[in-house]
């Protein structure tokens, strides 16, 4: 019997600047990067229209921030999947696609056999195989390099679980792939880095980093760690050792990404607006199909929203400007950090207001870093809606 989770060899990456190695440069025609790359000249209105039938409508509540959607949900699986990052909605949707034979294969990431945190692109062809790909990975991996091998195997109906830069490139090439059906399950992404850098971060969080099995940035302003011996550790965001990381810890690509919420997916499965649960954005008819596959396995409700985001966003912007200029971050006194860290879950923005805050922070970060490090790219890489998002914070288009 064939392995239900298959890692396929792929070629070397073509040299690129501002590249997250989505996999396109490893395909048969690396020149396709020119039209597929999110970091060259993205056209979100056209792409959103092609995928969803319309572009985001700034008049509709929250579409300026989150992109086109039909509905948003705060949700969890009634029976969480063992080993999943949250309750396992993402992998369970893909598993149901395989169970119902709606797709021939799922392109996703599995843990590298030599490093549980390193993502390894794989093709999953049997429902049980989805159990092997649960959980979080950190780093870059050329997921889309598996598209051509999958098609060569005769797989014409695919599901892809990807982050925004992968999904943008996939959508740009979709018509040329000749697929009969494509479902795209998107996860939000922010501040990705190399797996090697991530290990450096883990070493700052625990004396025994090799025993960490789980890490999650939660919407209640805590990072949760779990260990092989069953221990758990919670660290307030303000107590994280961010100032100890090198300036290039987060590559410029991830500091200038304009698609935090994966707007070109059929459904986005994240956490920002979930207030302790998962946050789903059902974006189109295919997204509705994906939700329907879960039936009564899913418990859901409308997401909530509390607090005000302006203060945290202004503080983030001020520190981003200092960091981009090579100045040290303004550090809160050590005696005050634990106090404020424990107050943030009480007084900070929550639910959709937290999600809006993160999108505004990412938008501000994009403009600041592009203007400083790649100013010639800024007019082409920054979409109109991002300029609208940052305008209330005193950032104007030049």
Image (cartoon, grey):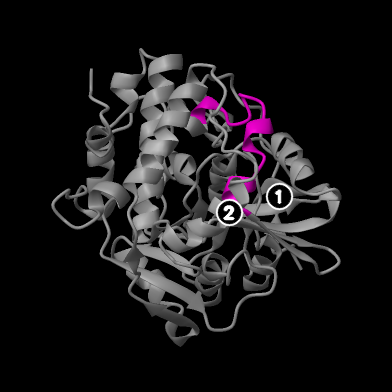
Q: Position of residue 300 (x, y in %)?
A: 40, 78
Residue that protrudes farthest toward the left in the picture: 59
**Upstream in sequence: badge 1 or badge 2:** 1
| Number of residues whose C-alpha sits closer than 10 Å to that of mark 2, classed few (under 14), some (14–19) or many (20 or more) | few
Q: Is residue 3 left or right of residue 184?
A: right
Q: Residue furthest top?
A: 376
Task: Locate residue 84 relative to residue 101 in the image: left or right.
Answer: right
User: In the rendered structure, does residue 249 fall within the stretch colored magenta?
Assistant: yes
Q: Are marks 1 and 2 in contact (CB under 8 Å)?
A: no
- Residue positioned 54% across, 39% down in the render: 191
Q: x, y (%) of residue 234?
A: 67, 60
Above or below: residue 33 compared with residue 67: above
> In the image, which residues are magenta?
236-253
Return the residue nearer the eye: 187 or 132: 187
Q: Position of residue 39 (x, y in %)?
A: 42, 28
Which of the numbered marks, if any, corresponds to residue 7? Answer: 1
Q: Which mark is residue 327?
A: none
Secondary structure type for disc 2: helix
| Rendered view: 26 above or below 152 | above
Residue in the foreground of this view, choosing between 142 and 375: 375
Which one is in front, 276 or 122? 276
Please give the residue where the numbered disc 2 appears in the rendered image: 339
**Secondary element at tag 1:** loop
Q: Residues within 10 Å of mark 1 (few under 14, many from 20)?
A: some
Residue name at image x 54 percent, y 45 percent? 147
What's the CA distance linking mark 1 and mark 2?
A: 47 Å
């Amino acid at each position: 019997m064939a392995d239900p989770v298959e890692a396929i060899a792929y070629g070397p990456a073509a040299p690129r600047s501002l590249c997250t190695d989505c996999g396109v440069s490893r395909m048969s025609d690396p020149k396709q990067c020119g039209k597929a790359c999110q970091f060259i000249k993205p056209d979100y209105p056209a792409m959103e229209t092609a995928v969803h039938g319309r572009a985001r409508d700034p008049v509709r509540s929250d579409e300026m921030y989150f992109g086109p959607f039909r509905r948003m949900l705060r949700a969890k699986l009634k029976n969480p999947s063992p080993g999943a990052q949250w309750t396992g909605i993402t992998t369970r949707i893909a598993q149901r696609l395989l169970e119902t034979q709606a797709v021939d294969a799922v392109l996703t990431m599995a843990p590298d056999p030599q490093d549980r945190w390193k993502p390894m692109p794989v093709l999953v062809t049997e429902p049980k195989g989805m159990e092997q790909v649960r959980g979080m990975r950190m780093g870059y991996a050329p997921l889309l390099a598996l598209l051509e091998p999958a098609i060569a195997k005769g797989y014409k109906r695919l599901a892809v679980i990807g982050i925004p830069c992968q999904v943008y490139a996939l959508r740009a090439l979709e018509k040329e792939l000749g697929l009969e059906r494509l479902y795209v399950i998107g996860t939000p992404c922010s501040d990705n880095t190399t797996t090697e850098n991530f290990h450096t971060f883990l070493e700052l969080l625990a004396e025994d980093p090799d025993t960490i099995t789980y890490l999650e940035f939660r919407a209640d302003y805590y990072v949760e760690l779990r260990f092989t011996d069953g221990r758990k550790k919670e660290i307030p965001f303000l107590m994280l050792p961010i100032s100890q990381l090198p300036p290039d810890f987060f590559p410029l690509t991830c500091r200038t990404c304009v698609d935090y919420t994966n707007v070109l997916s059929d459904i986005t499965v994240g956490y920002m607006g979930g207030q302790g649960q998962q946050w789903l954005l059902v974006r189109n008819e295919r997204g509705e199909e994906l939700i329907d596959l879960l039936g009564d396995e899913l418990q859901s409700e409308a997401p909530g929203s509390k607090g005000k985001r302006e203060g945290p966003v202004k503080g983030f912007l001020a520190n981003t400007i200092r960091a981009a200029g090579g100045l040290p971050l303004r550090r809160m006194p050590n005696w005050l950090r634990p106090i404020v860290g424990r107050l943030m879950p009480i007084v900070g923005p929550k639910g959709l207001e937290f999600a809006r805050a993160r999108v505004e922070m990412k938008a501000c970060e994009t403009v600041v870093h592009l203007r400083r490090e790649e100013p010639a790219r800024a007019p082409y890489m920054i979409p109109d809606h991002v300029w609208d998002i940052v305008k209330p914070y005193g950032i104007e288009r030049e």
